[in-house]
Image (cartoon, rainbow, N blue to C red):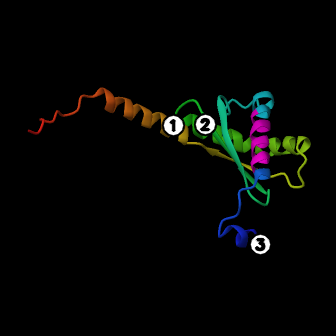
Amino acid sequence: MIERLYGCMAKPSSRLDRISDQIQRDVAELIRAEIKDPRVGLVTLTGAEISPDHRHAKVFFTVLGDSRQVKLAIEGLGHAAGFLRARLASTMRLRVMPELHFVYDESVERGIRLSRLIDEAVRRPGPRRQARR
């Protein structure tokens, strides 16, 4: 029915946004306070998305370090996902607690790389053109 009202795409749900934001805040606090796994180290959560049926949630993160640190963080967060889900279920009032899927957020790294390229392009003197007469 929503598809008929809003075309082929469903209207964005503010409830889903609020749940996603709450999941991000709560998981960040749980990681900080209760996860002692050294693989999880310096992880920063950058966002969360929940599926319309509330069964799955993608939690996006960045981590300081190289690709090895990213791989270790993915393993550590995957290992802790069940624990985090159970802790969320005890604090959030949802009929279905979503399964947590941790996804590395490359947008921050990509933004830094683009910023460096722009800075280099601005610093380099470009070829001079002769003025037309």
Which badge, 3 or 2, is on the more N-terminal residue?
Answer: 3
63 on left or right of 66:
right
Looking at the image, residue 117 lies above or below residue 57: above
Q: Is residue 23 magenta?
A: yes
Name the residue rendered at 37%, 29% in the picture: 119
Residue 123 x/y as whole percent: 31, 26
Residue 58 x/y as whole percent: 69, 49
Name the residue rendered at 59%, 42% in the picture: 105
Amino acid type indicated by mark 1: Glu
Give the residue number, with chain letter if any, for mark 2: 62
Name the residue rendered at 84%, 51% in the picture: 97
Distance from the alpha carbon under mark 3 to that under mark 2: 38 Å
Amino acid type indicated by mark 2: Thr
Q: Quadrant of the N terminus?
A: bottom right
Which badge, 3 or 1, is on the more N-terminal residue?
Answer: 3
Contact check, label 2 and label 1, Cβ < 8 Å: yes
In this view of the protein, which residue sits in the foreground, 76 or 63? Answer: 63
Residue 102 x/y as whole percent: 68, 45
Of circles 3 and 2, the one toward us is 3
Q: Is residue 22 magenta?
A: yes
Give the residue number, with chain letter if any, for mark 1: 109
SS for callout 1: helix
**Residue most extreme to the front:** 133
Q: Quadrant of residue 60?
A: top right
In this view of the protein, which residue sits in the foreground, 114 or 80? Answer: 114
SS for callout 2: strand
* Mark 2 Cα shell of 10 Å, populated few (<14), some (14-19), many (≥20): many
SS for callout 3: loop
Q: In the image, which residues are magenta?
A: 17-28
Name the residue rendered at 71%, 56% in the picture: 12
* Mark 1 Cα shell of 10 Å, populated few (<14), some (14-19), many (≥20): few
Give the residue number, with chain letter if any, for mark 3: 1
